[in-house]
Image (cartoon, rainbow, N blue to C red):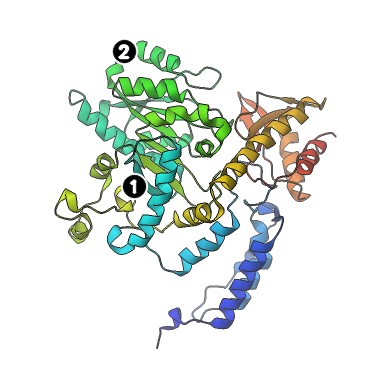
Amino acid sequence: MAHQLFTYDAKFAQAIFDYCAERLAMDPVPLDYGSLHEVPDSVLAGLITTAGCDPSEVLGLFRDELAPAVVSIDSPGFLAFIPNAPTKNSLLFDMVVACSGLNGTSWLEAEGVVVAENQALEFLAQRSELPEGSGGAFVSGGSVGNLSALTVGRDVGRARHPELKPWEVRFAISADAHSSIGKALHVLGVEPLYVPTDDHRMTVENLKAALANDPNPNSVVGVVATCGTTNTGLVDDLEGIGNYARENNLWFHVDGAYGGAIILAPSMHDTIKGLRHADSFIVDPHKWLFAPLDCCALLYRDPTTARKVLAQQAGYLDILHGDDEADYKWNPSDFGIHLSRRARGLPFWFSLVTNGVAAYEDAVEKGIDLATMAAKKIDAIDYLEMVRPESLSIVLFRRKGWTNQQYNEWSEKLLRSQIAFVTPTKWEGETVARLAFMHPDTTEDMIDDIFASMAG
């Protein structure tokens, strides 16, 4: 007989299925209230006991007390930070992944996972115009993806420059690079060379000038460009920087955690052509490619080099690596800063396969169209003005005359009224409003209601 921890309760399972079905059927998904819905200490007091609690009662507690205290990131009204809008098929298949005990660590134990995930990775590599043979793994998010890729870039740079002390190698980055880039370099013991930008966008001219003015340019072994900055959606000069990196034997990493999804936007093809130069590239399907949290696609031009740097070695792991290079089978654990790994790429793969590429292209383009529409509306409202032109699916604008406190009060009022979840940001020291469009079901009426709420 199964241990009580592993006994299947059909009645409670049905209650879970019913809850999930009800949540999946919500149209539109309500925002809920986040921290505006306070959870008293008494709600959780005494729940952890020797004998355990009735699971149906705990499910009810979650539904009534805890769930409302989480803003639904998949709501079309979630326009703050970078939203997450998973497709229904990806959510359903994430349930399959959770219920199936799938381990995505190695080929030996998870060939069925790896071949499917690799099909999705190969598709993303093809849309990025990376060469045949490119590949990698799905990791937990952009921070781990960037850290993994820059670890490989650092070690490759050290090997190319044996005249440098290990701690002397540097990477050129923009001041507008995502904070995870700076944190990754700090963890790796690598100093950044900060490259000045042209209106917050790094160009090859900026890079050349920074290197020309640096006393030790030969210590720069790589460069990081951004495909869609988080705050503004700006895309660096991928073509110019990538071509320069290729000509000068620099590791070229592209952080496309948010904006890399435009590889599926035909209108943006010219913007991302430079991705073909990348030695490593990340894009988060859990952002603008409509997969559940947490999922980052990490791709390498030369996966073998990445594997030699990142694969973990131990006696009990020898069976995963084989005795001969020709015997090697693809282990996702060999391409990132991880070992144990859930099959986090499968929900994206399933959704892509079942919904089709055209539906994805249309949904990504819709985010761009929504930003364009919002910008036009702002231009037509006398109490609003654009801070800078919209880029990708992000709009920065200001309410004329407002203080930081007024923006914060407005943001809270929007959420309390369940109109939208919008948070202010900082731009060149000024508090401004920011909209990040991602969910294709965000409507024009929602946008109008947001702008109208700023009239008073």
Within 10 Å of disc 1 (Cα), the crowding (few <14, some 14-19, many 20+) is some
Indicate left or right for 144 with 394 as reference: left
Q: Nearest the camera: 97 or 420? A: 97
Residue highlighted by disc 1:
337
Q: Earlier in the sequence, mark 2 or mark 1?
A: 2
Q: Please state which amino acid type lies under the numbered disc 2.
A: Pro
For residue 125, above or below residue 96: above
Give the residue pinned by disc 2: 215
Instruction: For mark 2, give the secondary structure.
Output: loop
Whether 172 is drawn above or below 435: the answer is above
Residue occupying the point 53% across, 82% down? 9
Q: Amino acid at mark 1?
A: Ile
Q: Residue at x 31, y 20 (%)?
A: 247
Q: Position of residue 170 (x, y in %)?
A: 32, 26
For the C terminus, the image quarter is: top right
Residue lying at 35% horizontally and 11% vertically, measured from the top left: 212
Q: Position of residue 211 (x, y in %)?
A: 36, 15
Camera-nearest residue between 131 and 307: 131
Q: What's the mark number on residue 455?
A: none
Q: Residue at x 76, y 45 (%)?
A: 414
Query: Is 18 located above or below residue 441 in the figure?
Result: below
